Amino acid sequence: MSTKSKPADASRRRFLKKSTVGTALAAGALNLKLGSSQSEAGDVTKLPKPAFTPFVQALPVPPRLRDAALGCAPGSPEAKLCSKEVWHGIAPEFDPAHPSHHPDWDRKPLRCYEMTYQECIHEWVPGIKTPSLGFNGLVPGPTFRARLGEPMVIRVHNPLDIEASLHHHGAHSPSHSDGHPCFYTLHGETRDYYYPNCVPRNADGSEDWSESPSTMWYHDHGNDVTAHNVAHGLAGFSIFTDPFEEDLIAKNILPAIDGPDGEHAPYDVPMALTDQLLNLDGTISWDPLDHDGRIGNLFCVNGVVQPFMNVERRKYRLRLLGCSLARIYELRLSNNASMLQIGNDSWLLPKPVTVTRITLPPGKRADVIVDFSKLPAGSEIYLENIMEQTDGRKPKGINTRNPIRLVKFKVGGGTVRNDITINANTPLRPHHEIPESEIVATRDFKLGRSNGAWIINGEFYSPFRADADPLVNSAERWNLTNGSGGWEHPVHIHLESHQITKMNGVRPREVWAYKSDVTHLGTNTTAEIQMRFRTFCGPFVFHCHNNNHEDMRMMKQFEVCGKDPVTGAKHPPTLNNEWFSVPEECAGIPHDFIKANPHIFS
Amino acid sequence: MFSSSPISLRRFLRLEAAPTQVPVVSSKVTGQRSNLLHQTQIKERVTDRFPDVTLTNHRGQAMRFRSDMISDQKVLIGFIYTRCGGICPATTKHMAQVHAMLTEELKGKFRMISMSVDPTRDTVDDLMEYAADKGVANHDNWDFVVGSEADTNSIRQTLRLQDPDVAADGQLRNHSGMIIFGNDRTNRWSAIPAGTRPEHIAHGFLRMTRDGSLRSILHGLPAA
């Protein structure tokens, strides 16, 4: 059966005092007509930047988020909704009596962590002290490290006077803890983010281990303020393993993830790619009136501009993350050597794909094996970006003559023992295509632009409207279309992986042909995807991951709807059904709007 | 039709009332909370770049864009032209609904500006007639304004309202449907499409313009 969706509704230490008013006025006076030529000021890449010497700073690897003893137990009366300790409480699914709560979620003891949105001084450029925002004061934030099946609660405090919502990007989480943009943790408030760290279940009740994630990340997702918050540093890695991947590590097919000190092991390296823009006084350059997409001219990896990394003559696993707001990277090694891509977004591929280039739009991850063993000791190669982009609309195109070097790898000497054994034929995580017979609905979503902002199917995002109402544990086909020739939109869908079956009518490139959580829509592109909506009911979002576009409402909401246990009929989307009937203080969504509009949800 | 909803705005007003209430966060995990940003001075205001050009409101009064209408105020700015058969009527209607909600909540501590993007045709009389037709001509804190073509473009450029696609920008009907709002005291500015529901606009305005917000001290504007 196929039904069309019905839209249910800083030079260094030099502090400049500049009078820019005159400049703006002068520039404005030149444009006497609507539609007169645009100023060239759009090319931020040509803006002055703090002076620095590239490749003298070692690549930092974020520390792990360490277990914490919480003041009061998650889910306890002291930590309940609207409590003094934890204003937003915890996901209803935390309760073992909740219908979605599977007993298996409690096989392992609960691990507890604490994280705080903090102001910090961060040196994006060595020696330049930049007021930034970091989780626990770190940029990037501390890395989550968990094993599938180990439930965790992260108690998140927001003492800052900004709106906050922590999104665990690529994770399979309850709506309450997914980082829905309107489930704010406001100034002075706290929320217990419950992650059962489960995999979804197949129709026969067995666990779908093909959905087990490897490389995830987390970032702020506050409605209207995501771009601001991420640009200031609110992002970090989340690295998971399951028995399958642990077996690959035990067999020395993949390198170890965990060092003996509990920190990250040396041959598995997460790399968050960010393009930062600083003023000459060292402050972050942020234009609140720019909605095209923020482009920077300082190429940072793990929060540091153009670092170097000493490598041994062996294979490394690099987990590349497109952590930029609007920049789309086309990555290669400066010696044009091939790499083995073993994962796309959160998930390992069924088998490695040999690549020489990697396209990395905002939000996307590429998990790759780089082999330095053939290089002579003392050689230096770079990870480079060859995609030229000067504004937030779209890249200008590949420019191989002027590559931007991101990281320098300095190849050391010495004897290498126990190099990992992965090769192009190593079987990785089995993939199961969603069969046609499972698809119960097809929906079309057309992304566009309207009067200076962005729309999907002609509408701006509304948190009080379910734009799609998939039935829990069912599958659907979505056609995502970017009809524009002028803009590109990387679309991120929450809750679960989706499978891209076609890009403009043909099978997508191999690395994107399995599981994704970001589908990049280039200009005039239609992607046909299929996706299951399992385990959790409630509102989730999908949106353009150009964070400025997302803030300007290029977002849609789907509410996963449960079934009536007696009649088997699908519950209508309500956004405040029985298990989601939380006060507005919990969600951040003022439910009285919903109650005032029952016809929208009937 | 949905009703305005004072209850839904309560949370943000609670924050407004107590901007300095910062909870003690477990120092074991997070360390001492930094006061860094509170101590940092705003070096450059977003509004420093707004042109201080003279506009005329629908009552025929001359008003300077930055010094009279924006400096030290909470402002919500929409863009219209009186002959518009597209999004302008909805923009003004939504702004009127927002005005009703905010007036109830904020008791007049904000200003609204509806700026004409058709300065060669829109006259003061046109603006008065338009405002009267929408039933909002008599709000003291709401001005419908028009300026010279050069000044209008200067404002459009400063507020980043021009479409980067020159052909699209040349068509009046494509003019920006954004509502820009901010609080010059906290230096915090944002925008929202005028086509979103008035509740969202009111929400965004209340959240982002509340006094006590410190966020914009964090950064400066890109070099002009």
Image (cartoon, rainbow, N blue to C red):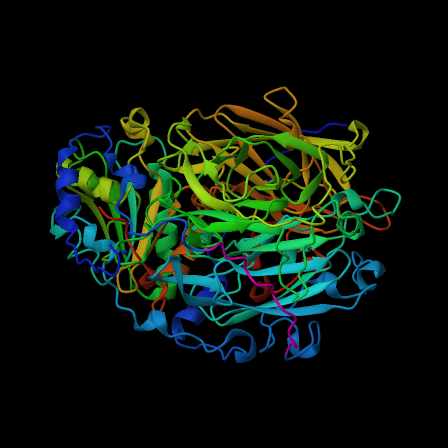
Q: Position of residue A108 (x, y in %)?
A: 80, 65
Number of dots carrying numbers = 0
The secondary structure making up most of the magenta span is loop
Task: Compare residues A224 and A134 and report the one nearer the observer.
Answer: A134
Lateral position of residue A56 relative to residue A223, left or right:
left
Q: Position of residue A118 (x, y in %)?
A: 46, 67
Which of the image's four quarters has the C terminus of chain A? top right
Q: Is residue A599 visible?
A: no
Task: Compare residues A269 and B202 and report the one nearer the observer.
Answer: A269
Q: Is residue A437 visible?
A: yes
* The furthest residue to the front: A414
* The furthest residue to the top: A505
Q: Position of residue B79 (x, y in %)?
A: 28, 41
Q: Is residue A67 magenta?
A: yes
Q: Is residue B115 magenta?
A: no
Q: Position of residue A192 (x, y in %)?
A: 63, 67
Which of the image's four quarters has the N terminus of chain A? top right
Q: Which residues are magenta?
A: A58-70
Task: Compare residues A251 and B217 and report the one nearer the observer.
Answer: A251
Lateral position of residue A410 relative to residue A87, left or right:
left
Q: Residue at x 50, y 46 (%)?
A: A410
Task: Compare residues B224 and A491 and report the one nearer the observer.
Answer: B224
Lateral position of residue B196 relative to residue A525, left or right:
left
In the image, residue A155 sits, relative to residue A503, either above or below, namely below
Q: Residue at x 67, y 55 (%)?
A: A257
